[in-house]
Amino acid sequence: MKSGVSPQTAAARLKRFSRLRPTLAIVLGSGFQHVLTALRVDRKIFCARIPGFPVPTVSGHAGELVFGHLGDTPVLVLSGRAHFYEGHPMERVTFPVRALAAFGIRDLLLASAAGGINQKFRPGDFMVLTDHINWMGTNPLRGPSVSGLNRFVDLTDIYDKGLRALLVRAGKACGLRLYQGVYVAVSGPSYETPAEIRAFARLGADAVGMSTVPEAIAARQYGLNVAGISCITNPAAGRGKGPLSHGEVLKTAKKVELLAVELLKNFTDLYGKTDRAWRRQTETAAC
Ligand code: HPA
């Protein structure tokens, strides 16, 4: 690792911050920061204080790691993420996920903003990721082989069916427009051209964004179950009327922030029940 810090070192530091041992972690991107207001916080740490963690520089990304409860469910929330377009190498972009895996996280929800390619999508809709297309021009697992880790990771079912089903149920419970579809990841930071968006549509993409995919791939290398949810903040280039801007992304995100909170709160409630059920089953089996 170039930073010289191992995920285990970061995980050991995290364990000293809080006694909570959540099995679920959530990465909050643009559009989901308001979820923090619904958290019962146990401990909050700036990413800069965790060895190896990159510090996000994008507006709307707090750069904090929070231990807490959403409803009754313990969660580890990474508020804000570092993007490839900020100039971080992939190993740094994915470092938090690898540290979370070393900490003992089992399930990971990646929340982000995305542009709508599918013509049915409107700003303020949400999309559960069923699959992705990696158009970032690189792969986060590229590099020397790491002992004990599979280099040739299978991505056939990268987004876990069980977690996806929970997201769909969570969305139905709050009556929002929740689609399922394919996310294409680009490196950014420029937005796409209309020709690129038409090409992505032909390739089968429903939404486009600049995150999620590196973290999802890294998480699968560690065997985490991954789910992805995107807030459709704008029509992708050439799909809407005006030019695109980060301001528009933040404006739509603000409009639906309460829905985003409700969606994730419902999700963690459902997850908590499932998780407890799993634990009970394991305990019963052990008796
Ligand atoms: N393109 C890429 N990333 C994005 C977009 C977009 O239109 N909207 C939000 N993130």
Image (cartoon, rainbow, N blue to C red):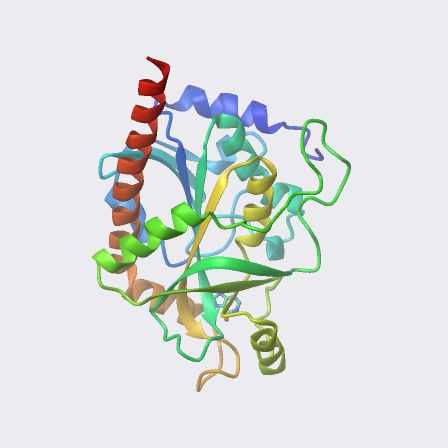
Give the farthest residue toward the right.
Answer: 144
State the residue at coordinates (26%, 64%). Answer: 176
Q: Is residue 86 above or below residue 279?
A: below
Residue 12, image x, y percentages = 51, 21
State the residue at coordinates (48%, 58%). Answer: 130
Q: Is residue 66 above or below residue 165?
A: above
Give the farthest residue toward the bottom.
Answer: 241
Left or right of 137 in this view: 253: left
Quadrant containing the N terminus is top right
Residues 141 and 41: in front is 141
Can residue 202 be seen here? The reply is yes
Residue 279, image x, y percentages = 33, 26
State the residue at coordinates (25%, 42%). Answer: 269
Residue 82, image x, y percentages = 54, 48
Residue 121, image x, y percentages = 39, 75
State the residue at coordinates (58%, 80%). Answer: 198
Can residue 42 be seen here? The reply is no
Rendered image quadrant of residue 40? top left
Give the farthest residue toward the top.
Answer: 287
